[in-house]
Image: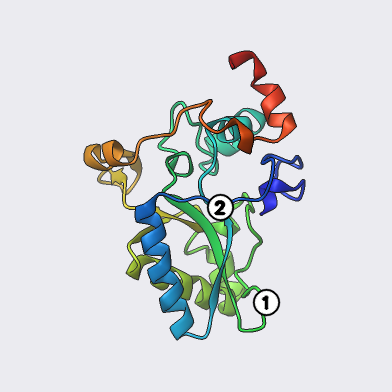
Amino acid sequence: IPYATKDNFCHQQLYSHPFIYLHRDAFKNLQKASEFAEKKGLKIRIWDAYRPFEVQAFMADKFPEHVENGYVSHPSEGITTHVRGIAIDLTLIDKNGKDLDMGTGFDEMSELSHHGSKAINANNKIAEKNRQILAEIMEKSGFQIYENEWWHYNLKIFKYDEKGEIVGAESIADKNYPKIPAGEFLDLLSPDVKKTFSKDF
């Protein structure tokens, strides 16, 4: 789990230990996705799912440019599907446990990570195909694509405007999958993150 180590885009340990938690609805869909992947001779590798409020805020405060560019959502303002426990970051691996080529690594904060990236589609047909396979598996399983990140999928909660831009969360979904507030799971925070927010507890 990258966020339980320093090998992540923040270059700091964010979680106190490796864990993967999901809302039960997302877990049911993940089980379906695993079955679809298995039929293709593949398996799923999970990098992240539920993310504590404090970790999400730490990311957003540390990298405001990623918030502005649509890669990190601030938990106080954004939809933050990870903080609701309904998002999962994942990839596909082959029968030998090797990650399929997706064109970028996890948490590559650039347009190369976007679904339909022109650079990927033009220069890496294998990655383009693998992304399509992952998207097909996840959408058939009841998850929704996030256009900026090929590895991120969440339960269907987004509301879009006429241009296809996310403008909020559907009211029923928002009620069914509320944000888990700060202070709920302090034992999941690394010492660095806990220290940053210690004044709030």
Residue linked to disc 2:
20
**Label 1 SS:** loop
Q: Are marks 2 and 1 in contact (CB under 8 Å)?
A: no
**In which image quadrant can residue 194 be found?**
top right
Q: CA distance from mark 2 to mark 1?
A: 20 Å
Q: Amino acid at mark 2?
A: Ile
Q: Position of residue 72 (x, y in %)?
A: 54, 40
The quadrant of the picture occupied by the N terminus is bottom right
| Residue drawn 70% across the image and 35% down it | 190
| Residue drawn 66% across the image and 77% down it | 97
**Label 2 SS:** loop
- Looking at this view, is 68 or 93 the one in front? 93
- Looking at this view, is 73 or 13 the one in front? 13
* 83 up-or-down from 144: above or below: above
| Residue drawn 65% across the image and 73% down it | 99
**Nearer-N-terminus badge (2/1):** 2
Residue linked to disc 1:
98
The quadrant of the picture occupied by the C terminus is top right
| Residue 31 seen by the camera | yes
* 105 up-or-down from 132: above or below: above
| Residue drawn 25% across the image and 46% down it | 162
Q: Position of residue 10 (x, y in %)?
A: 71, 41
User: Horizontal placement of 26 versus 14: left or right?
Assistant: left
User: Horizontal placement of 125 versus 196: left or right?
Assistant: left
- Looking at this view, is 69 or 75 the one in front? 75
Q: Amino acid at mark 1?
A: Lys
Q: Position of residue 93 (x, y in %)?
A: 60, 75
* 124 up-or-down from 3: above or below: below
Q: Specify the farthest residue to the front.
A: 187
| Residue 64 seen by the camera | no
